[in-house]
Image: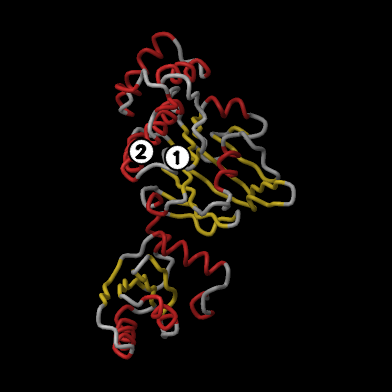
């Protein structure tokens, strides 16, 4: 394994009885990366992360963490890693401070080292004024911050986070990602799984998972560049009727619906725009807006899923 590689995953699979949750995944994650594992529920994100954390053993293949085998050297891996599972996983009847001190004791962070570390964590996570609160009485966002503080109390070089922002409000989500950006700036290798495509935009590289397989692994910009053509955003009062008509137009690759907005992926922006305008005119629809829109990770992911399932026209999929 190269010196700049923190995690080396080779042909890893994991089955649960008759269910194949992870299917022959190969990935390499570099030291200092902020790496995203993105996909819908059931894609295999949590299973893959738990294998990286040496909690689950692969059914097939190997995982090396900083040169340590995830099966043979599980205890060595746990000492250099911080892991934050989906569930809160802390003691709700203990205070913030008691949770931190207990976790520190588990990792052997004691005495002067701990007393120096605690103020840093309180400031980093804005938990100073909540240190005597019972953990179970914290808001969802503050619970996530406490879980993160516990995961990094021993200053691990590797951090594994399983859907850390699920169930929290948008403001708390943004604040949590600000914390992750701070850790990334300090050189911590961070692997985060998420179902949110906007969070994928914040990562250096992203692995898109679907049905236990990697559809793509690259920078967000490179993944979006895999989608041919461009995006036109159409709003109107009759999108439900328009959507199937638009799909029938030559040059329309895919349509994705967001309320009264249709994001139309097209092969050629100017040519297809004219066809759309002609269609709107023929359908006597005048209460609309049709604008250029940026390609987002969400459009790219749905396109790649449709490509994998053969749901795109043959000339586009090829």
Hey, which quadrant is residue 56 in on the image? Answer: top right
Q: In what element is the residue under mark 1?
A: loop
Which mark, residue 71? none
Mark yes or no: residue 309 visible: yes
Q: In what element is the residue under mark 2?
A: helix
Distance from label 1 to label 2 (Cα)?
8 Å
- Is residue 75 left or right of 155 when viewed as pictured? right
Coordinates of residue 61 in the picture (x, y in percent): 67, 45
Q: Residue at x 40, y 68 (%)?
A: 257
Above or below for 153 versus 227:
above
Above or below for 130 versus 240:
above
Coordinates of residue 249 in the picture (x, y in percent): 41, 85
Q: Nearer the viewer, residue 151 or 93?
A: 93
Q: Residue at x 50, y 26 (%)?
A: 90
Mark yes or no: residue 30 visible: no
Read off the residue under disc 1: 164
């Amino acid at each position: 394994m190269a010196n700049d590689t923190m995690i080396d995953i080779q042909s890893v699979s994991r089955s649960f009885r008759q269910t194949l949750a992870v299917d022959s995944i190969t990935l390499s994650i570099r030291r200092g990366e902020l790496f995203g594992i993105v996909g819908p529920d059931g894609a295999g994100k949590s299973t893959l992360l738990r294998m990286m954390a040496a909690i689950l053993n692969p059914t097939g293949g190997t995982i090396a963490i900083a040169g340590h085998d995830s099966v043979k050297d599980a205890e060595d891996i746990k000492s250099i890693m911080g892991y934050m599972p989906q569930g809160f996983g802390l003691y709700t009847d203990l205070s913030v401070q008691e949770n931190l001190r207990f976790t520190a004791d588990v990792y052997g962070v004691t005495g002067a080292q701990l007393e120096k570390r605690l103020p840093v964590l309180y400031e980093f996570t804005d938990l100073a004024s909540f240190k005597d609160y019972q953990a179970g009485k914290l808001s969802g966002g503050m619970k996530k911050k406490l879980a993160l503080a516990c995961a990094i109390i021993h200053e691990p070089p590797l951090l594994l986070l399983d859907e850390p922002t699920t169930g929290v409000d948008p403001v708390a989500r943004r604040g949590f990602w600000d914390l992750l950006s701070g850790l990334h700036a300090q050189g911590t290798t961070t692997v985060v799984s998420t179902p949110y495509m906007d969070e994928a935009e914040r990562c250096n590289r992203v692995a898109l998972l679907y049905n236990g397989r990697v559809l793509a692994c690259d920078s967000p910009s490179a993944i979006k560049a895999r989608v041919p053509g461009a995006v036109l955003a159409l709003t109107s009062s009759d999108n439900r009727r328009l959507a199937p008509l638009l799909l029938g137009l030559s040059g329309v690759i895919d349509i994705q619906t967001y309320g009264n907005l249709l994001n139309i992926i097209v092969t050629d922006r100017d040519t297809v725009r004219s066809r759309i305008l002609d269609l709107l005119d023929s359908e006597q629809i005048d209460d609309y807006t049709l604008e250029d829109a940026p390609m987002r990770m969400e459009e790219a992911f749905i396109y790649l899923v449709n490509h994998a399932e053969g749901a795109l026209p043959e000339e586009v999929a090829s």
